[in-house]
Image (cartoon, rainbow, N blue to C red):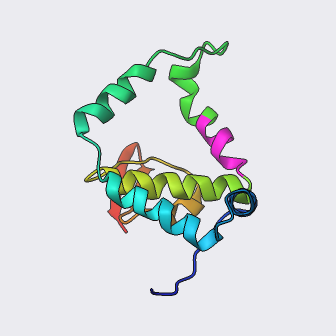
Amino acid sequence: MIRTQIQITEKQAQMLKEMSLKNHESVASLIRKAVDQFLMAGKPDRSVLYRQASAIVGKYTSEQTDVSIEHDRYLDEGFGSLDSDNFNSLYLLFDYLKNQFDFIVTISHIDKTRDMVDQIIDITKVGGFSSIRYL
């Protein structure tokens, strides 16, 4: 076996310890089993992913009547207030998406997300026109 280090959230560590005690199995063994399940699952069929995504379209409602206009502001409010545990979950989500798809496009005003992506395209408005830089 190869020894390695990983970082997990406090909640994940707590849940693993509880499961370890309950099942009389080491935390390392539980993590190895989870990694095996992840690796065995592979990438799901793209049509399945599209069906899953389509199933949630229109499923949720909001009392806000300006979401189509103010969506950037609402997303900034949601992502801008992430604590470290929830931000770690966002990092895991990005990692998951990168493993599931050939490419993903994300638009964000949050500087921390720059560490989560492979390529950054900076778009700024200059004199009424958009300026694009590849960083």
* Coordinates of residue 47 in the picture (x, y in percent): 23, 32
How many discs appear? 0
Magenta span has 39?
no
Residue at coordinates 63% horizontally, 15% vertically from top-left?
Answer: 62
Q: Is residue 75 left or right of residue 130?
A: right
* Image position, residue 15 (x, y; %): 72, 56
- Asked whether residue 125 is in view, the answer is yes
The percent coordinates of residue 125 (x first, y second) are 43, 48
Q: Quadrant of the C terminus?
A: bottom left
Q: Residue at x 53, y 23 (%)?
A: 69
Q: Residue at x 50, y 68 (%)?
A: 32
Give 4 or 49, whichever is nearer the viewer.
4
Residue lying furthest front in this view?
24
Q: Is residue 59 above or below residue 23?
A: above
Compared across the picture, whether 20 is left or right of 68 comes to right
**Magenta stretch: dominant secondary structure:** helix
Q: Is residue 77 magenta?
A: yes
Q: Nearer the viewer, residue 33 or 50?
A: 33
* Residue toward you, 2 or 85: 2
Q: Is residue 99 left or right of residue 7?
A: left
In the rendered image, which quarter is residue 39 located in? Answer: bottom left
Q: Position of residue 81 (x, y in %)?
A: 73, 47
Work out whether 38 lies above or below 77: below
- Range covered by the magenta-colored residues: 75-82
Query: Do we see residue 7 in this rendering?
Result: no
Looking at the rendered image, the quarter that the N terminus falls into is: bottom left
Residue most toward the bottom?
2
